[in-house]
Structures are given as C-alpha cells and as structure tokens.
C-alpha cells in the first residue's frame, strides 16, 4: 500500500515532488537539528487522488490517526483536550512556492471547552480567546467558503465599540463577544454550527487545503508563473506555537540577504504579540527585524545563527518564517527566497565570490526573463517632479498609470488598453488578477514580506508598500497624502519600486544602466549590478553552443544588435525596404502592362535595395547576414479594396484613369486568404524578374563591400518553400544571377542559398528539400499558424484567453514553441534534413528565437543558432548558455 503521510523526521529537501516545498524544508530543518515544531506531511499523491476521485485515498485516515497519536505523545497533549489541548495548524505546501494562493487554518483543536483549558494552562485568558476567534474566522472563510468581509466587519465593529485602533487593544471579554459574533456569522451563512470535534475540524481543513489547489486565485497564479496544473499540494499538520501570547512573543519573516537588492545584512519584519498571518497580510505594520535584537536579544542571536546555517546549507538566499513563544524561538518554514531580478544577478555572483557555487551554477540562478526586467527603463527625476511620499521599495521598476482602487477595475481598465496602478491598504490573494493587470502596486500597509511585496517580486511587478502617510479610502476611490494632496481614481501616479518614491503625475523614463552597458556606454565595472550582469553574460557566452543572431532590417538595427552581442543577422525582411516613398515604385511594378514597364520598375528598385544591403553588410561585417527575398503578397503595398472602390464610386465619371487602373489591379490581385495565396517563393517565381532584381542587388552590394575592404557574408533565403521543385528552380535562377554579377564585378563572394521552413509540408519533406538548400531557417510564426490552423491576427484577441483558462494550452503558442506539435515538425525537419545533407546549417528566425523556454528547445534539437529582435539578443545569449550548462549537467548525472 502506498505511503501517504510522512513525519518531519522522515523527509528531506529533495522530496518536494512528494512533500511539497514547505514539507520538504520543514523535514530538512528538523534533520539539521533546528527548533521546528513537530508534525507530519500528507503527500501530494493524496491530494491528486482527492481531486481526481472526490474522496481521500484508502488508508489515509488510518495513517493520519497514527501520526496524530505519535504527535500527541511527543507533545504530551491530546488534540482538543478540554483540560490541556494540543492545537495544530493545517498548512498548504506545493512543490513551487505560491505565496498566499492556497489555504491555511491555525489553532485547530479549540472548542467551547478546550478554550477554557488553554486559558488556564497559559494563564492568559485574552490569548486563548484571541486564538479561538482566529480559528473560527479562518475556518469560516477557508473551509466553509464564507466571505471574509463578514468577519472583518464584525472585528471593526468590536474595535469601534471599544474605541480601539488595533485588535491588540481588545480584552478577553471583547474577544469572547467577538467569538460569539463569529459563530453567528457561520450559523447564518453556512447554515451549520462551528464544529466542536477537533478531528472533524482537522479533516475538513485538510480537504479544504486540497481543494484550494483549484481555487481561482491558485489557477491564475499557476498560469502566470507557468506552474503545471497537475502537481497538487501537500498538507502539513504542525503543532501550534504562539506568537500572540504577549509582548514576550511575536512572529516574523527573515531573509538571509535583501530580496530587493541582494545586499547582505539583516532583512525582515517582526511583529510582537501576533500570529504569522498578521505579518504576511500586512494588517498591522511591522518593525524591522533588527529591532528584535532590542526586544529579545537571545532569540535574535539564535535566529542569526540559524539564518547563517540555512544559507550555507542551501547555498542561496533563504526566506524564513519564525515565531517566538514566550522567549522560545521556533522555525516554521524556510525556502529559497523569491527575489528581484537585480538581486538574482548580484546574489549569484556574490555566492561565486564566496566560493559557495561555481559560475555554471550561477547562470542557472538567473533567467532571461529577469535580464529582460533589468533592461526596462527607469525614472528620470532630474526634472521637476512632485513626490507624494516615500515608502518601502518592495519590488523594483518604474511604473506609471492611472490610480485604481480595486482589482476588478484594474482588470477592466487594463482590458481597454489603459495603464493602471493598483492602490490598496493591503492586498490579499483575491487581488491577484488585479495585480497581474496593473503596471504596479502601491499599498499603505505592510512591508517587504507582505503579500503584495512577495507576489509582486515573484511576478517581476513594480511594488511600493507601507506608505503609511497615505490614507487610502477604497470606497471613495481616492487617497489623501500630506500637504493636502488628493489622488482620485483615474489620476496618474508614478511609483518607483527601486527607491520607494511615489510621484504625482507621469515621470519620464530613461534607459537602464544594463542597456547602457550593452550599448557600450557604461564600463563593465561601472556599478555592482552591471558588474554582475557582465560576469554572468561572459560565462554564458563561453558556455553556450547556440549562436545568437538578430532579426534586423536596417544598418542602425544591425549595429545595435552587434553591440548587444549578436554574431550575425538571421533575418533581413526585404519587404520592409519597399515601404514609405518606395511604395510608388512597387505600384508601378504591379501596374506594369508590358515587360518593358515591369523591367523599368525593377531597375528603379534595384539600386535602392543595393544601398540598403550595403549598409547592412557593412554594419555586420565579418558575420553572416541572411536576407529573405520578398515574402508578403503584393496587395499589401496597394490601397484597401473597399476604400478604393468607394472612392472611385463616389467620384463617378470624374474618377481619374490612375485610380481606375489601380482599382482593376487591386481587384485582380485580391485574395480571400492572402496569407495562403500568392506570396513567398510563389511570388518570386510568378513575377518575372523579381527574384533576379533582389539577388542582383545583394550580389552587387557584397561585391562593393569587398572592394571597400570589407568581409561581407550574405546568405539568400527563399521564403515559404513547400516543395523541392520550388527550391531547385529558385536556386538555379539565383545562382545564374550570382554568376552574372561575379563576371560583371570580378568579385567572388560565397553566397549560400537556403530556405525558410514555415509550411508543414516543407518540414515533412525536409530530406528532399535539403538536397537543394544549404541551410534551413525555421519561420516559427507562420509554421505555428499553419500547424494550428490559426490566423494570428484574428485568434489571439478572439479566444486565446478562453483557451488558456480552459487549459488547452498554458501559454500562447506564438510566445513559446509548441513542443508537441510545431516542435515535432522542427525536430523532424532537423533530423531528416541533416540525414540528407550532414553539413546543413540550421537556425530559427521566428519570434520564438528570443523566448527563454523556446531557446532551450532549440538547443535540445540541435539547431546552430537562434535569431531574434536586437533587444532580446542578450536574453537569448543568456538562455543559450543556461541550456548548455543544464544539458551538460544532465549528461553527467
């Protein structure tokens, strides 16, 4: 029979798949001899069974009962004993950290009888009733599904009646009355009594935690963070320790390094006379962790020793939750802490300098997504700005948007294309959809360990917390600040998650230091963050097998890509050179009634194209430049059919002959589905002289660069090939033109000729096409459209949101390569192409070339390079290095 329950002494940190992150790390701390309250973990296997079948697996109840008896023996108390009750918490704990997204219930075991025993044993009646009302509140919200506002209103009423500003000012009698009010809420809204049997409380709480895996907020968070939906959560049953027993007790969260900057030191929050949920929820503002040294030096010194032990053991930034109960320190959780992008790079290189990890490990500790965040702009405050307040820098970045005061409004306005800043007193897990929609989050309560701060850092979202000077009125949809400043919904504010500053109005932005470093404007040692990025990128470049090229259509774009580290151009889109003033020449080509008129139009276009190619080849001198012949259908260069028809119709007999001829041409070229019509290789084969003109411009430009002392390396790419015959005809024509230009100029420039693989048939017949093509470049944008049968311009706005919600795919296949479908075609074409031509050069030039996850796939299937926009070149370089290091690691295991 499978085992579903593990004591903390039986697990370790490597069992996260089975015990979840929290359970595995509680077990690890127990094995290290740290002060962890005893308990046990119910596995993710049990959760998955429950979610699939609606019942707990056979044998689970008996296992839980056995481990509960062992826990009672260890603690010397029975669960819910009226005279001296053992109390437990029931906590979620998935493999990947999902802060606040799933449920927890504290103080299980309290009842109308056992609360009296707890009061007597603790000698603190107020503490006992405070613990009991918290249990009823959590149980009602988490297990019975009652709206938490009912309990909040009751608490507010109790404070108002007492004239209290904080719940700590309520005495035992006040809390007794509040407990009675909470019971009434359960009776009214759940149509049942609060359960008095402790085992019933525990069993219902365990099932509620299982079910919280599929709560709306958990599903939304998993989609945002790309966490698989089939993992399930473990459940941890832990003996309660109490931080709310008086001023000699408290609870806190600590980080072994600053999760915002990566700096070493004492970072965290502490709250006297409170339970852990109070810190995370930000209900009361905390004090800095350093203050614990003054409040309780013994516990502080022990905590510092434990923090050092954990960081050395995990070799990483650790996030720690702890409670002090009457001067006794207890460790409730540790995990590798979420951090900002800047902190990730700094910490990785710090750990290398300290000899804790090597550079291979360091580049696995950062990601392309994090590097992208470092490349975002920052505020320029050199001009006139109006600073409203200065608060806690919880998650860095520069965010500007209209103020909104609830999550639903944030989602609604963002869907309309508006940029918004979500402003709350404090956030809770139900605010997740608004946090995702907003540019940034601003709260008046909480610190660096509050819900808003932790979730924002995980998402890379700008966040400022603990802006105590702001009086946030969510009902009136406004906040007031010192100096008589009032910000109402719709007013623009700017928040700086790096400094914690909040500004009225829009503050301009400037390029980040990291971008200036890539541009060559800052030296590698100009600051510690740039130095960390330089160290990581240097090693990633040394480690990677994949080349990184850029998609660039102009000389300046190519020059920038080169500064950003590109070692070639994987896609020059020649059709972009026909826009603007040159559009008239294309119209002349289309309207040409004779061969002479058509050739005259081509002759006029050729020197313009040649000049463009010279500029590009010069910018990328010494590196390969893959030039795609014209791809889109010609109607894209002509006026819209409907608009032109209306124009001619309204003009009647006065319509010009030019407009009439143009309308005839547009009608002649009009296609019902132009993306599957006359375009790509079909166009260059059907329009006489078009291929010749473009190839001649390329060859002449290359010859001119050689004469100027350059080292041009052009490559000609035939688009949309679906058959080997198309490739053979195109290649023969191109080679004939290359020979003509060589004879004309006396210059030989080796010019490989290959094709884009963007039609499923091309991938399926790659072995044949490879006989005529010297290279393949996968055009994954069109390949995705044709494989899925999607029209990208139509489907993304029409139903992709619903497809993601339904779980049909976790992320748009246009963002990350569809490994099972499109990816399989790439793999087939790679294998069969190389089988036919072993020296076949392979790359990708779709947008996937700059997507971190897709880069790993292209490394895995054996492509030679990826090509992406210039801005994403550093991201692709980093991910190519990470993929190489990971593959070496897996090969040696």
Image (cartoon, rainbow, N blue to C red):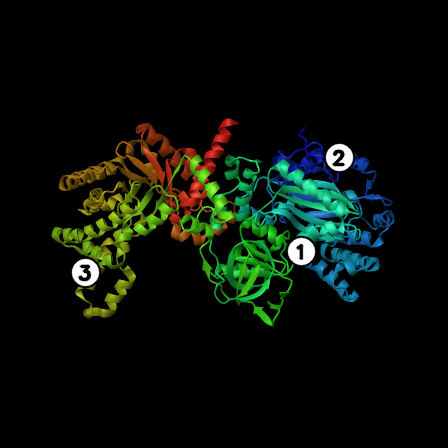
Q: Is label 2 in contact with label 3 (beta carbons under 8 Å)?
A: no
Question: Is residue 87 placed above or below 178 in the rendered structure?
Answer: above
Q: Residue furthest bottom?
A: 484
The residue indicated by pointer 3 is 661
Which residue lies at the image location 56% right of the left edge and 62% below the top edge?
502
Which residue lies at the image location 22% right of the left edge and 42% below the top edge?
706
In-front residue for pair 197/527 = 527
In-front residue for pair 195/770 = 770
Where's the N terminus, which quadrant?
Answer: top right
Query: Could you tell whether 256 is left or right of 796 in the image?
Result: right
The residue indicated by pointer 2 is 67
Q: Earlier in the sequence, mark 2 or mark 1?
A: 2
Question: Is residue 556 placed above or below 777 in the rendered structure?
Answer: below
Query: Could you tell whether 401 is left or right of 235 in the image?
Result: left
Q: CA distance from mark 1 to mark 3?
A: 70 Å
**Dot 1 lies on which element?**
loop
Q: CA distance from mark 2 to mark 1?
A: 34 Å
Which residue lies at the image location 66% right of the left edge and 30% below the top edge?
2
The residue indicated by pointer 1 is 282
**Dot 3 lies on which element?**
helix
Query: Could you tell whether 693 is left or right of 436 in the image?
Result: left
Q: Is label 2 in contact with label 1 (beta carbons under 8 Å)?
A: no
Question: Is residue 616 placed above or below 187 in the rendered structure?
Answer: above
Would you call the spot at circle 1 few (<14 residues within 10 Å), some (14-19), or many (20 or more)?
many
* Place of residue 142 in the rendered image (x, y in percent of width and height, measured from the top left): 69, 50
Q: CA distance from mark 2 to mark 3?
A: 87 Å
Work out whether residue 469 can be spotted: yes
* Place of residue 398 in the rendered image (x, y in percent of width and height, measured from the top left): 51, 57
Q: Is label 1 in contact with label 3 (beta carbons under 8 Å)?
A: no
Question: Is residue 481 placed above or below 773 in the rendered structure?
Answer: below
């Amino acid at each position: 029979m499978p085992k579903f329950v593990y004591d903390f002494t039986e697990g370790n940190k490597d069992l996260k798949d089975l015990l979840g992150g929290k359970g595995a790390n509680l077990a690890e701390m127990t094995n290290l001899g740290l002060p962890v309250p005893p308990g046990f973990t119910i596995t993710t296997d049990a959760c998955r069974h429950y979610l699939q079948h609606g019942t707990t697996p056979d044998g689970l109840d008996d296992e839980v009962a056995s481990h509960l008896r062992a826990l009672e023996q260890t603690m010397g108390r029975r669960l819910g004993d009226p005279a001296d009750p053992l109390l437990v918490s029931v906590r979620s704990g998935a493999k990947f950290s999902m802060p606040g997204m799933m449920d927890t219930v504290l103080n299980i075991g309290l009842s109308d009888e056992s609360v009296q025993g707890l009061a007597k044993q603790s000698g603190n009646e107020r503490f006992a009733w405070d613990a009991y009302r918290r249990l009823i509140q959590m149980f009602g919200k988490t297990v019975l599904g009652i709206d938490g506002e009912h309990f909040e209103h009751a608490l507010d009423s109790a404070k108002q009646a007492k004239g209290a500003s904080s719940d700590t000012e309520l005495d035992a009698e006040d809390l007794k009355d509040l407990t009675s009010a909470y019971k009434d809420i359960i009776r009214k809204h759940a149509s049942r009594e609060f359960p008095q049997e402790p085992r019933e409380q525990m069993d219902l709480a365990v099932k509620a935690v299982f079910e919280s895996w599929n709560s709306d907020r958990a599903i939304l968070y998993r989609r945002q963070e790309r966490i698989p939906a089939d993992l399930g959560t473990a459940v941890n049953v832990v003996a309660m320790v109490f931080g709310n027993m008086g001023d000699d007790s408290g609870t806190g969260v600590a980080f072994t390094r600053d999760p915002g900057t990566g700096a070493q030191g004492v970072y965290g929050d502490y709250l006297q006379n409170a339970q852990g949920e109070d810190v995370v929820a930000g209900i009361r503002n905390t004090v800095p962790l350093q203050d614990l040294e003054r409040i309780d030096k013994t516990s502080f010194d022990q905590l510092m020793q434990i923090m050092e032990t954990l960081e050395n053991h995990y070799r990483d930034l650790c996030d720690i939750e702890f409670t002090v109960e009457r001067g006794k320190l207890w460790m409730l959780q540790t995990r590798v802490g979420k951090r900002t992008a800047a902190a990730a790079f700094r910490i990785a290189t710090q750990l290398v300098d300290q000899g804790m990890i090597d550079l291979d490990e360091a580049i696995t500790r950062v990601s392309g997504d994090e590097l992208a965040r470092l490349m975002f702009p920052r505020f320029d405050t050199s001009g006139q700005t109006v600073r409203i307040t200065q608060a806690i820098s919880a998650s860095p970045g520069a965010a500007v948007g209209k103020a909104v005061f609830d999550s639903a409004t944030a989602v609604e306005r963002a869907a309309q294309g508006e940029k918004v800043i979500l402003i709350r007193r404090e956030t809770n897990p139900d605010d997740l959809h608004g946090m995702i929609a907003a540019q940034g989050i601003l709260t008046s309560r909480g610190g660096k360990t509050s819900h808003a701060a932790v979730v924002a850092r995980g998402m890379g979202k700008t966040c400022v917390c603990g802006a105590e000077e702001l009086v946030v009125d969510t009902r009136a949809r406004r906040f007031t600040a010192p100096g008589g400043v009032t910000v109402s919904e719709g007013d623009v504010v700017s928040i700086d998650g790096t400094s914690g500053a909040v500004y009225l109005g829009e503050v301009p932005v400037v390029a980040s230091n990291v971008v200036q470093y890539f541009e060559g404007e800052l030296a590698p040692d100009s600051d510690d963050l740039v130095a960390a990025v330089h160290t990581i990128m240097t090693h990633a470049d040394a480690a990677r097998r994949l080349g990184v090229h850029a998609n660039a259509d102009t000389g300046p774009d190519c020059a920038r890509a080169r500064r950003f580290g590109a070692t070639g151009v994987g896609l020059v889109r020649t059709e972009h050179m026909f826009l603007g003033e040159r559009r008239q020449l294309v119209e002349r080509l289309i309207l040409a009634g004779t061969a002479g008129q058509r050739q005259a139009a081509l002759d006029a276009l050729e020197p313009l194209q040649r000049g463009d190619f010279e500029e590009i080849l010069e910018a990328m001198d010494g590196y390969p430049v893959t030039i795609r012949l014209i791809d889109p259908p010609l109607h894209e260069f002509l006026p819209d059919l409907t608009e032109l028809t209306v124009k001619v119709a309204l003009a009647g007999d006065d319509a010009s002959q030019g407009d009439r001829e143009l309308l005839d041409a547009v009608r002649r070229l009009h296609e019902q589905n132009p993306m599957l019509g006359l375009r790509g290789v079909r166009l260059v084969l059907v329009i006489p002289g078009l291929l010749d003109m473009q190839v001649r411009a390329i060859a002449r430009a290359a010859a001119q660069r050689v004469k100027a002392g350059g080292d041009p390396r052009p490559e000609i790419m035939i688009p949309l090939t679906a058959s080997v015959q198309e490739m053979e005809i195109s290649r023969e024509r191109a080679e004939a033109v290359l020979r003509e230009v060589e004879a004309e100029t006396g210059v030989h420039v080796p010019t490989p000729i290959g094709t884009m693989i963007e039609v499923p048939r091309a991938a399926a017949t790659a072995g044949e096409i490879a006989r005529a093509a010297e290279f393949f470049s996968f055009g994954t944008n069109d390949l995705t459209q044709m494989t899925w049968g999607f029209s990208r311009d139509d489907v993304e706005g029409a139903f992709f949101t619903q497809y993601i919600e339904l779980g049909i795919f976790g992320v748009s296949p246009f963002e990350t390569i569809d490994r099972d479908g499109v990816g399989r075609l790439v793999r087939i074409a790679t294998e069969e192409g190389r089988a036919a031509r072993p020296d076949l050069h392979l790359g990708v030039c779709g947008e996937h070339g700059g997507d971190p996850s897709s880069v790993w796939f292209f490394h895995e299937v054996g492509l030679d390079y990826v090509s992406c926009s210039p801005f994403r070149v550093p991201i692709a370089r980093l991910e190519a290095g990470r993929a190489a290091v990971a593959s070496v690691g897996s090969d040696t295991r």
